[in-house]
């Protein structure tokens, strides 16, 4: 009979409802969410340009040889300019078919040089010299990676400070103490249009070898701090 006695003793224990074991959450105070934007101007301190050569002829090897020789001369000229970094870009060779579309009439080749500089005047001078050999496809300016990274870090700190100041103003207006529940930082950029050189379809004559008129301008950076505060009773 002993097992029966133990079972009856267990059943005699008071049974608590399941909800009694779950702590009741304290109602949160009034929650207000808002965002703050910080705008900063930063210099377009890195200029980049693409210069290219395009040639065609009946013999693909002959065309490739001429393009290679002229690109080597152009790269040597670019490297001789102070403050300039240059490297090879894309190279494409493709056949051009005759009217029948069945046989190759001639071959066309295009090869590019990519040029960078932190000095707009140096870039303008280099491109002016290269115009004797190559066409200038595009020129653009943007903040250098390290410039943008520093601006983003500085703007993020400003955005957090501005968020905290706004939170204090909201709480003071409502005459309530508060705590910050959440802050998120979002980086975004609104780049102002950069001055560009006009696209060229053929290499310019030697008389046009003067420096290109370039102006780097500025870019606009936007950093947003969004979050929530809780007003306490």
Image: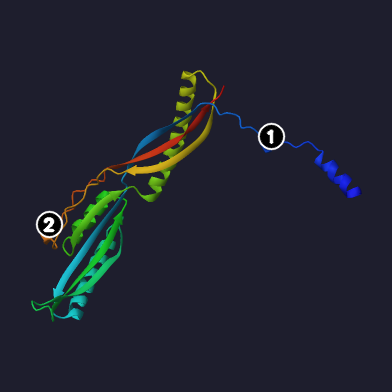
> Picture quarter containing residue 16?
top right
Reading the image, the residue beneath label 1 is 20
Q: Image point 44% across, 36% down: which residue?
A: 226
Q: Is residue 178 above or below residue 210?
A: above
> Picture quarter containing residue 70?
bottom left
What colour scheme was applied to this rendering of the protein? rainbow
Q: Is residue 185 above or below residue 101?
A: above
**Residue toward you, 225 or 214:** 225
The quadrant the C terminus occupies is: top right
Q: Which mark is residue 208?
A: 2
For this orientation, the residue located farthest to the left is 99
Q: Image point 26% across, 62% down: which residue?
A: 78
Q: Image point 30% across, 44% down: which residue?
A: 191
Q: Which mark is residue 176?
A: none
Q: Is residue 201 above or below residue 170?
A: below
Q: Gap in Å between the C-alphas at discs 2 and 1?
A: 88 Å
Q: Are marks 2 and 1 in contact (CB under 8 Å)?
A: no
Q: Is residue 18 left or right of residue 178?
A: right
**Under tag 1, what secondary structure?**
helix
**Residue toward you, 154 or 82:** 154
**Under tag 2, what secondary structure?**
helix
**Residue toward you, 217 or 107:** 107
Q: Is residue 188 left or right of residue 100?
A: right
């Amino acid at each position: 009979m002993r097992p029966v006695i133990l079972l009856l003793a267990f059943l005699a224990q008071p049974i608590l409802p399941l909800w009694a074991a779950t702590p009741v959450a304290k109602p949160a105070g009034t929650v207000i969410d808002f965002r703050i934007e910080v705008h900063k101007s930063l210099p377009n301190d890195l200029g980049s340009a693409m210069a290219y050569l395009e040639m065609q002829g009946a013999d693909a090897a002959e065309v490739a040889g001429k393009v290679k020789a002229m690109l080597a001369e152009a790269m040597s000229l670019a490297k001789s300019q102070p403050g300039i970094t240059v490297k090879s870009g894309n190279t494409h060779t493709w056949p051009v078919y005759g009217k029948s579309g069945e046989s190759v009439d001639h071959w066309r080749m295009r090869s590019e040089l990519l040029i960078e500089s932190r000095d707009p005047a140096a870039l303008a001078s280099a491109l002016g010299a290269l115009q004797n050999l190559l066409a200038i496809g595009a020129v653009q300016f943007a903040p250098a990676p390290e410039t943008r990274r520093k601006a983003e870090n500085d703007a993020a700190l400003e955005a957090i400070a501005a968020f905290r100041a706004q939170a204090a103003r909201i709480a003071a207006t409502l005459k309530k103490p508060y705590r910050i529940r959440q802050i998120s930082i979002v980086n975004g950029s609104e780049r102002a249009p950069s001055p560009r050189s006009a696209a060229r379809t053929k290499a310019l004559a030697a008389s046009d070898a003067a420096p290109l008129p370039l102006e780097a301008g500025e870019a606009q950076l936007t950093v947003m701090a969004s979050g929530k505060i809780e007003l306490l009773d």
